[in-house]
Image: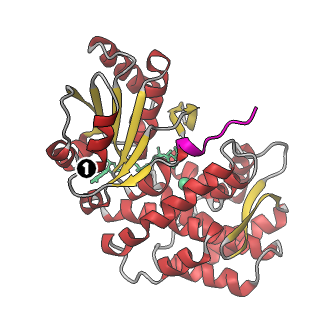
Amino acid sequence: ITINFTENLKMITIVDDNFSQLNDFLHEKSFSKIFILVDENTHEYCLPTLLGNMQTDLGFEILEVEAGEEMKNIQTVNQLWEILTEMQADRKALMINLGGGVITDMGGFVASTYKRGISFINIPTTLLSMCDASIGGKTGIDLMNYKNMIGTFTFPEHIFVYPKFLETLPFKELRSGFAEMLKHGLIADKAHWESLTQIHKLDIDGVIPHIQTSMDIKQNVVEEDFHEKNIRKTLNFGHTIGHAIESLYLSQGNPILHGEAVAMGMISEAYLAYLEGLISEEDSTLIIENIQKYYPYLDISDFKDEDIFDLLLNDKKNVDSNINFSLLSGIGSCAFDHKCSKKNITASLKFYRELN
Ligand code: NAD
Ligand code: ZN
């Protein structure tokens, strides 16, 4: 049986200032009621714009959760399931996830499980969720200290992107999302990478013109390999070492933003790709210098190589005791399931440490 996901996946729209594409969508479908999930920040900064433009005869309710990754857990999900039940949400209800990746991941999970699944749409409000988290059909929550342990593969009915929501996003959050855009260029599209590296001042005017391309790259990769058997793995470039560093910071009670860890991961993995003979030293240097332009040095001196290795060995991507990497094979192309020698991984960490 061949399942064709194409129709499902062609569903991202950049909306105009009146949100007319969203209004058309709401008119065309026959939902019973709308539930809008926000966190405290998107309630304050994004919801007024949405409500000011949304035209529908349907009733709606606002569901608000506190902001932050700590809320992306089963307790919050349980509260949301209970509220939907108390408000008598039926199977024709629509959930609108208005927020960053925490809201789109968790809202998607709630919608995909409540009454065995109700419709939901994503309206991403961070750069990371616009270019990455809201696309690809992965929903989920964290369990204990493990990220995204519980979840479903369920597509939103549509993704509506309003780039001006970024106007209120703190700079560090914007820079965090930018790391995923750089990654998309590096793994799949040299021209995208080159235009991103020409942004001198990282701000919304610089990034907005490139959002569409970055979303398209993620969407195309997912479309080609929904089940992450091959090319979808390339999206993990920078994330093997990056995730380990992110976890170590978290375990110290000192969390850093995902994109900050990914930027560090991309630097040491670009050098690793050179050591493994996949790219030239010249390309490796060019990549590293361009990432360094945007990200301050991330101090990893508190972490021992052995602690990093322990985490690398636990990575979800490993199938046996080998450490599997997605590594660049050029600027704009990426290999996956590449097993690296411990010697080279150690050398790439040493290289990063010496950049300080
Ligand atoms: P987030 O949702 O926590 O948002 C970051 C911060 O920005 C929050 O404090 C939020 O309240 C605030 N915010 C959001 N929009 C704003 C706006 N327009 N103005 C002002 N403040 C705003 O985090 P994120 O970085 O968007 O997403 C991270 C999450 O995404 C993680 O949980 C990660 O696991 C997940 N993720 C999922 C996928 C996927 O494929 N499903 C991919 C990547 C990341
Ligand atoms: Zn990421």
How many numbered tags mark residues here? 1
- Hey, what amino acid is under mark 1? Ser
Residue 208 in the image: state x and y as whole percent.
Answer: 36, 68
Q: On the image, numbered disc 1 is attached to which residue?
A: 20
- Which quadrant of the picture is home to ligand 2? bottom right
Q: Which picture quadrant has residue 337?
A: bottom right
Judging depth in this view, the residue of 89 and 6 nearest the camera is 6
Q: Is residue 75 above or below residue 307?
A: above
Residue 174 position within the rendered picture, expressed as x and y whole percent measured from the top left? 37, 63
Residue sitting at x 30%, y 45%: 22
Q: Is residue 6 magenta?
A: yes
Q: Which residues are magenta?
A: 1-8
For residue 222, above or below residue 111 = below
- Out of 161 and 140, give the one closest to the viewer: 161
Inspect the magenta stretch and tell me whether residue 33 lies in it.
no
Asked where in the image residue 78 lies, by quadrant, the reply is: top left
The rendered magenta stretch, by its main secondary structure, is classed as loop
Residue drawn 76% across and 83% down?
280
Quarter placement of the C terminus: bottom right
Mark 1 surroundings: few (<14), some (14-19) or many (≥20) residues within 10 A: some
Residue 356 visible at all: no
56 shown above or below 265: above
Location of residue 291 in the rendering, given as x and y in whole percent from the top left corner: 53, 76
In the rendered structure, the answer to whether residue 337 lies left or right of residue 244 reads right
Element type at marker 1?
helix
User: x%, y% of residue 23?
Assistant: 26, 43
Q: Quadrant of the N terminus?
A: top right
Q: Is residue 229 above or below residue 142?
A: below
What residue is drawn where x is 21% and y is 45%?
Answer: 50
Residue 242 visible in the current orientation:
yes
